[in-house]
Amino acid sequence: MQYPVNEVFETIQGEGVNTGLPAIFVRLQGCPVGCPWCDTRQTWEQKPENEVAPKQVIQTDGSIGRWAWFDARSLLQSFSDGAFSAKHVVLTGGEPCLFDLVELTNVLNHAGYTTQIETSGTFEVKCSDSTWVTVSPKIGMKGGLAVKSQALKRANEIKHPVATSTHIEQLDALLEGVDLTGKVVCLQPISQKSHATALAIKVCIARNWRLSVQTHKYLQID
Ligand SMILES: C[S@@+](CC[C@H](N)C(=O)[O-])C[C@H]1O[C@@H](n2cnc3c(N)ncnc32)[C@H](O)[C@@H]1O
Ligand SMILES: Nc1nc2[nH]cc(C(=O)O)c2c(=O)[nH]1
Ligand code: SF4
Ligand SMILES: [Mg+2]
């Protein structure tokens, strides 16, 4: 199976439970969810005119919407070509769960990589059993997509973007009846806004949830 890839780069995982872990990020192209504050708007559309050669998306500027086709084997090869040393691969996007990630995550796991998916939860999550799944629920966004119960059930981590108390209320409604045993709930302030961060800190302390700040933005790394 082939996947449209916007960028492949090595950095430190900046968000969630695995914050601080060196990781190879694979950003897939395409997302119909439409969050107004999205960090990666350049990944929303897979425009035919923006297709480039695979080497043009390895450790280069992904901020324009270019993308290249990779399959699991050519992606692994690009990790050696890029001389990456991280042993953790984060599949993000765009919305990576637009694609069936079973083969890709299995190939990566067999090659010795641990895997993680960053997803909005609006599509079924298809991946290897050992993949760490981070669902960042998107509620009431422009694309009109709902969070799938399969995605919430599969999630190892629920990392909710927050700016206002409405976002907390929406999360509470979404999680009603969801068994959270073994799952970590994090709140992630939207765009490092001070009121969002203060709210996230307050609610995390009250609920004994985790705070996830986008540490890479504070560090000014990718
Ligand atoms: C760019 S998204 C890509 C993966 C997937 N579409 C998703 O939303 O989870 C990766 C992560 O960044 C978060 N994110 C995007 N823009 C953000 C922003 N401005 N502030 C805080 N978090 C943001 C998302 O909620 C998600 O957890
Ligand atoms: N350093 C770093 N950590 C991240 N964690 C999740 C990211 C994403 O865009 O999915 C991201 C990212 O873009 N950079
Ligand atoms: S779901 Fe993720 S990639 Fe898509 S618009 Fe929202 S934050 Fe951006
Ligand atoms: Mg990001």
Image: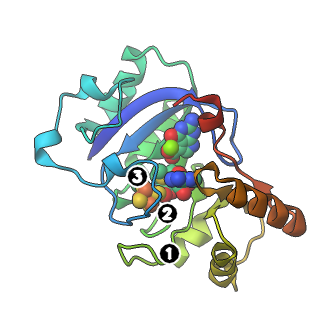
How many dots with numbers?
3
Q: Position of residue 153 (x, y in %)?
A: 61, 71
State the image coordinates of residue 138 (x, y, percent, origin top left).
51, 69
Instruction: Kindly identify which residue carries mark 1.
Output: 147
Q: CA distance from mark 3 to mark 2?
A: 15 Å
Q: Which residue is mark 2?
A: 120
Q: Quadrant of ligand 3?
A: bottom left
Above or below 174: residue 111: above
Tag 1: residue type?
Answer: Val
Check the image and report above or below for 61 versus 50.
Answer: above
Within 10 Å of disc 2 (Cα), the crowding (few <14, some 14-19, many 20+) is: many
Residue 198, image x, y percentages: 78, 58
Badge 3 local density, few (<14 within 10 Å), some, or many (20+)? Answer: many
Residue 52 vertical position relative to residue 16 in the rendered view, above or below:
above
Q: Is residue 60 left or right of residue 153?
A: left
Identity of the residue drawn at 76% across and 64% down: 199
